[in-house]
Structures are given as structure tokens and as C-alpha cells.
Amino acid sequence: MQTTHVIGAILVVLFLILAPYILTPYLTYLLTWILLWCIFAMAYNLCFGLGGMLSFCHGVFFGLGGFGVAWSISAGLNPWFALLIGISLATISSLLIGFISLKTRKTQFAILTLIITTIAYDVSLRFTNITGGVDGITFSIPKLVLGNLVLPLSSPAVRWYTVSISFLISFYIYYRIFNSPFGLVLKAIKTNEERCRFIGYDTTRLLLMAFVASGFLSGICGSIFSLIYGFACATYFEASTSIYGILWTYVGGLGTLLGPIVGCSLLVPLTDYLSAYFRRYWIVIGALLIVCIYKFPKGIIGYLIPRLLTRKTLEVIRK
Amino acid sequence: MIGQIVLGIVNGLVWALIMMLMCLGFNLIFGVLDIVNLAHGEFFMIGALIVWFLVGRFGYTLFLPALLLTVILGFSIGLLVERFIFRPARGEHAAQIVASFGLSYILRDIALVCTGGVAGTLAYPISGVISLGEFSYSIYRVIIAGIALILLILMWALLFRTNFGLLVRASKQNRELAVSMGVPAKRIYLLTFGLGIALAGLSGTLSTSIMAVDYMMGHEALILSLIIVCIGGLGSLKGSAIASLIIGLIEGIFSAFLLPPEVKILCLSVLVVVLLFKPRGLFG
């Protein structure tokens, strides 16, 4: 790691620790919300940006993570155990869906995941006694017990720290995968899968590993979401959850390390404002998707970095 | 029991004919232009909305004009969409999928604003039934199936018996070779895209005899047609025809005994079994 990375990491951690004392309650609430979705954006980037798998079923992993927590809390289990169940439910489902979907590639993969997620949504709406249908399941927000500490998850500060810690853990996993040989191979597979297979990589297994890692991170996001807000809902099964993931990664910069985080932190507040004032805000999101893909295919990070670099080099030359 | 199954089979056949039109459109666009159009379902919905609006307001004398209007409108929207949504992303399926999904959200929400989100059904213009022994079936649905069949035969004739069809098939088989042999590729592409969209619209207009009209019907139809297309093989016209018969019959027969989501799971499991053994579909 370079020194700039270390300094950056220390600054971020300091900010995460101090934020509830500095920021107004509303900002803390908003930032919690954004940080939570950042985990999902990172998970999506792992799948789409790194592995090139355009998946529409990340909403299923998110939703199942949430339902796992909701069901186990309703059954009276310990929140830690509930988290474990939620995350493993999401991971297992991603393994299953990935195994089936990775029989195919690219276009057919996207179509297949779209079919699966739509049917999962239909099924979850039908079995309302388990899933609560459109209304979802609400439960009283539990208290986390850590040794002698009892932390009520309904308090904003505890929520903030829970989300920050899970964000840091997820970011660490994501960072390690991104900079590992595994990540490099994934990039290679995205560029040309046939050649990778020719070299001797078992591409299906590697892609499945990336898909499951992505499902695992989405599961973390979903179960933490459900745990701190006391709510799980079938509408997250819809393809539109994955559409958000696509939008964030595209806007931030597809396949870049920080792209999804940038895209997510810009667009989550934007869509929140938009949805408050304009009920048919999906028109705007749809238009944004089309514009982003054609006008900014590299995203903010991919667009800015070369420009900043050239300006710097120009300055160096002038001096 | 047997009556129910026979009814299911006949219903399934009618539904299969309608879905065949839709999948034919999807596969034409995919096969000839190499475009994945996930907004296809929304054009299905627009076709249904046109019929619902015209027929619901002015009666069934306008059913055939509504079909004509759908074709014209679908064709012209298709040309616009090809020009502005898909042409910038030629050859990049991921971008096409995302862009067309964005387009489908836009169209769906506009439809929601226009209709106010009410699900509408149309009363049948002909209430008579055809009776064969103890089995009876609505004449109107038979007529609809007949229209779908005529349209399919027309499409077959267009694709396999005319010069235009020859050019389309040539550019489907090998694009570069076709272009180098002097096939006017751009015109063929535009016309084929318009034709595909018009087919989706037509199948939507015909579906008003079976489905309720609302803004989400396009998504439902899209998912069903995607299942069919995946089973038959992407881009294969013969495959999608056979697969739509299979899926139509499964839907028809089993919806008498199972809930709609369970029927969908059944369709999905058929798809999964097919993909496990033939990842490219039956005829891909």
C-alpha cells in the first residue's frame, strides 16, 4: 500500500468515528443510508464491473438477506445469529442462481437472471403469509449485546457505527478482491473469456466465485439494512434494485475501485429528493440510464482521472 | 377433469399463437440486427393500450383500425428507437440491455400516467360459443387465434417467399457478406426493427382478449417471451415457434390446477432443465 492510501484510509476511519458528533442528525441519517447502499454498489461492481456479468438478480440476494434477519428475529433469535442466517441465505441463493445462470454467458446470462428475479418477486408476492407481500415484515429493532455493552440499534449513533463497521469490512473484502490476482483474472475474463480458458483458467468456477462474493456482500447490505430499520420487504426482489446498482456503477465508473462509491453517494440523495417531489421519478432514472451509457460510458472516475492526470503533467512540463 | 384439460390445451394454443408473434418480433430484431431489446414488452403494452382506448371508447367497429394503427405507430416508434437508442450501441449487448431497460421504465411510467394505473378489461364483442359435445369455447377467442394465425402465415410468406425476406435472411445469416454483396443493410435494418416492434404491438392488441390491460402487462409478457426465446435459442425463429407452443401448453394446462406463480416456476424449471443440457437453447 502506498502512503497516500494509508493516509486516506486513516482520514476516512477518523471521519467515520467522529461523524455523529460533527454532523446534524439529518445528515447522519442520510449518510448512514448512503453508506449502506455503498455496500450494495460495491457488490454490484464486483459482479458487473470486474467480472462483466450483467446481473439482474442482486435484489434477490439483498431481499433474502433482509428476510433471513426478519424471520430469525421474529422467531426470537439473537441478532448476531440473525445476521449470520441472513448473510448465509443470500450467499447460498447466489451460489444456486449463479450455478444455473453461469451455464450461459453475457446476453443470455442477463436475460436468465432477469427471468429468475421476476419470478422470485411474483412468488414472494403470492406467499404473503411468509413475506408480508408489498407491505413487508416489520419487527421491533433488536439490541446488540457485546459483552457487557447493550447497544440499541434504534439509536442513530449505534446505527451509524454498525453501518460504518460493516462498510469498512465490506470495503476491505472488496479492496482485497479488487487488487488480488483473482481480480486480475476476472478483468481478463471480462476482456476475453476464450483466451483465459485457453490459458488454463476454469472461467466458470472463477466467475461463480466472483458472483458468490458479490452475493455475499449484497447479503451483508440486506441483512444490516433489515436489522437497523426493522423492516424487510419483497419489493427489493424486483429488478429495479439491480438497476440502481447498474446506475451507480455506471455513473461512478464501471470497473473502477471507488467508482460505485462515488456514484452511489451522488445518486442516492438525488433520487431521494426526486422521489419526494416527483412521483414518477423512474422516468428520470430511465433517461439517466440511457444518457449515462451513451454520453459517459466511463463514468465520473473514468472521465475525471485522465483529465486530472493530463493537467498535472502539463503543469509539470510548464515548470 | 378432461374438459378442464381440453380447455387448457385450447387456451394454451391461443396464447401460444399470440406469444409466437411477440417472440418472432424479438428474435427478428436479435437475429438480424444483433440487438437485445428488453423494451419489447412495453411495445406489447402500447398495442394493448391502443385497443383498450379505441375499442373501450368507440366499440369493436374500431378493432381492425386499431390493429392498423398499432402497426403504423409501432413501425414509426420502432424507427425512432432504433435511431436514438440502439444505433449508438451497435454490437454492445450490455449497453443495449441497460439502455432498453431504461427505455422500458420511461414508457411504463408514461403509460401509468396516461391510464391512471387502472387495470381494464374489454367485454367480448361476440358472446357466442362453439359447442362440440359437452365442450364449448368462446367464438371470439377462436377469431383472435385465427387473426394471429393469419398474421403468422403472412410473416412466414414475407420472410420466406419475397425478395425482402431473402435480403433479411441473408443479413441474418452473415451480415458482412450480405453487405458486400450489395444488400442495402441500413434500410433492411430499419425495416426489420420496425417490423419487430409492430409485431410486439400486434401481439399486445390480440392479447386484450385474454389479459387485463394495465401498465405492467408488458413486463409480464416480456418475461414470458424471454423464457420462450431462451428455451428455443436466441435468434432462432423455428426454436421460438416450438418453444412458445411448449410454454403455451404448459401455461394453459397447468393454470387450471396451480396458482400463477407456481405455473411460472414450472416454466422456469423447464427453462433450467433445457439450459442444463443445451446452454444455447433447443435450436440455438
Image: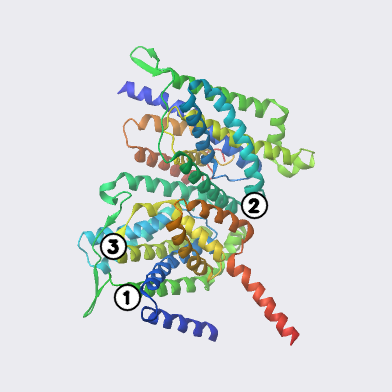
Identify residue for label 2. Answer: B89
Q: Do marks 1 and 2 share a chain?
A: no
Q: Is residue A144 left or right of A63 when viewed as pictured?
A: left
Within 10 angstroms of label 3, few (less than 14), some, or many (20 or more) residues? many
Front one among A284 and B129: A284
Cα gap from disc 3 to disc 1, whole angstroms: 16 Å
| Residue A90 appears in the picture as rendered | yes
Amino acid on which disc 1 is placed: Ala
Q: Quadrant of residue B9?
A: top left
Front one among A200 and B252: B252
What is the number of the mark on residue A89? none
Q: Earlier in the sequence, mark 3 or mark 1?
A: 1
What is the number of the mark on residue A230? 3
Front one among B110 and B93: B110
Query: Residue B266's spot in the image, x, y percent?
Result: 38, 39
Residue extending farthest to the left is A76
Query: Residue A96's spot in the image, x, y percent?
Result: 40, 54
Front one among A49 and A104: A49
